[in-house]
Amino acid sequence: MKLENKVAVVTGAASGMGKAIAELYAKEGAKVLVADFNIEGAEQVVQTIQERGGEATAFKVDVSSKEQVEQMIDQVISEFGKLDILVNNAGIMDKFEPVADVTDESWEKIFSVNTNSVLYGMRKAINYWLEKDMPGVIVNTISTGGLNGAHAGAAYGASKHAVVGLTKNSAFMYAQKNIRINGIAPGAIQTNISNSLTNINEFGISRAGMAHALTPRMGESDEVAAAALFLASDEASFVNGIVMPVDGGWTA
Ligand code: NAI
């Protein structure tokens, strides 16, 4: 098993890609804190993991709250004795508004959930690893909207570009402390978020348009989880500071 004796936190793990990542990590031997503000969904994921013989606990968190994210990291350490892997996956999407239409409220909300949350989690986990002189791994779920201008609204795109910067800067800063930090840039993946886009055609963006890639279909959460497993595992021991597209060639 690729994550034997590892302890992981996955945020946004009640559905979509986070759920797939949590279940795959548990299957590969990790003990997983399944963190989400949808606690019922998180508990269902824990139940699935336990039925398959894995180990997991649900944790209710609003990742836009610094206090709650810090409690989440404290909780995993007190529950499972340590932390090895942090997956910052929780996120929300805007309505693909171009900058002229972005409201202050929408901008602040998107940044607090998609970007500030990543800072809170990374800062707490990295300080823990530095104090303990332990290795650590971070995987951030970003987006192709964090790599180019065409795949997102202004607030979402900017919030994900910021996470690319945080990922690369931190990988550079902490590589010598044995902390690896990478990101994944999913393309159009079949989840609740992408389903909510069905009616958004105003700016020429539709699910069919999103699915235009070298592999002309939407991706599955499991295909993203496979990348998250690789980046978290020792197989990626020489991989640091990258943002890996998992997009069927959309950004090729
Ligand atoms: P999803 O909606 O299925 O899952 C997101 C999860 O995050 C949900 O369980 C939700 O309850 C949780 N969440 C949302 N806000 C939260 C908060 N403030 N605190 C705690 N939990 C919160 O969506 P999906 O697609 O699995 O999204 C996962 C990540 O992937 C997000 O960061 C999203 O931006 C990103 N992404 C999604 C793409 C897609 O096509 N589905 C494409 C590129 C990136």
Image (cartoon, rainbow, N blue to C red):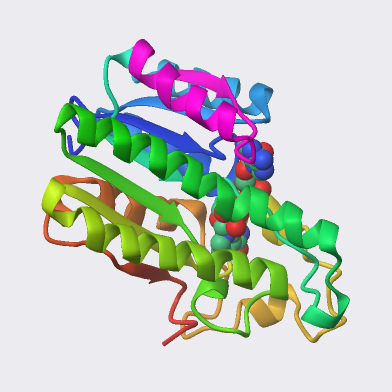
Query: Image check: 187 left or right of 21?
Result: right
The segment highlighted magenta reads 56-79
- Image mark count: 0
Task: Report the front residue among 45 and 128.
Answer: 128
Residue 155 magenta-drawn?
no
> At 40% from the left edge and 42% from the top edge, which residue is drawn?
123
Q: Indicate the quadrant where residue 199 lies.
A: bottom right
Quadrant holding the C terminus:
bottom left
Task: Report the front residue among 110 and 197.
Answer: 110
Q: Indicate the quadrant where residue 86 lies.
A: top left
Asked if one can make out residue 89 in the rendered structure from this viewpoint, the answer is no
> At 31% from the left edge and 36% from the top edge, which residue is drawn?
127
> At 65% from the left edge and 33% from the top edge, which residue is drawn?
62
Asked if one can make out residue 113 in the rendered structure from this viewpoint, the answer is yes
Query: Image check: 232 left or right of 251?
Result: left
> At 61% from the left edge and 28% from the top edge, which residue is drawn?
61
Task: Report the front residue among 129 and 58.
Answer: 129
Q: Position of residue 149 (x, y in %)?
A: 60, 84
Q: Is 53 located above or below residue 132 in the figure?
A: above
Residue 57 magenta-drawn?
yes
Q: Is 98 located above or below residue 27 in the figure?
A: below
Residue lying farthest top?
A: 79
Q: Indicate the quadrant where residue 83 lies.
A: top left
Q: Position of residue 188 (x, y in %)?
A: 58, 69
Quadrant holding the N terminus:
top left
Q: Is 200 located above or below residue 60 in the figure?
A: below
Query: Image check: 171 left or right of 178?
Result: right
Q: Position of residue 198 (x, y in %)?
A: 80, 66
Query: Image check: 186 left or right of 212?
Result: left
Q: Position of residue 48 (x, y in %)?
A: 49, 23
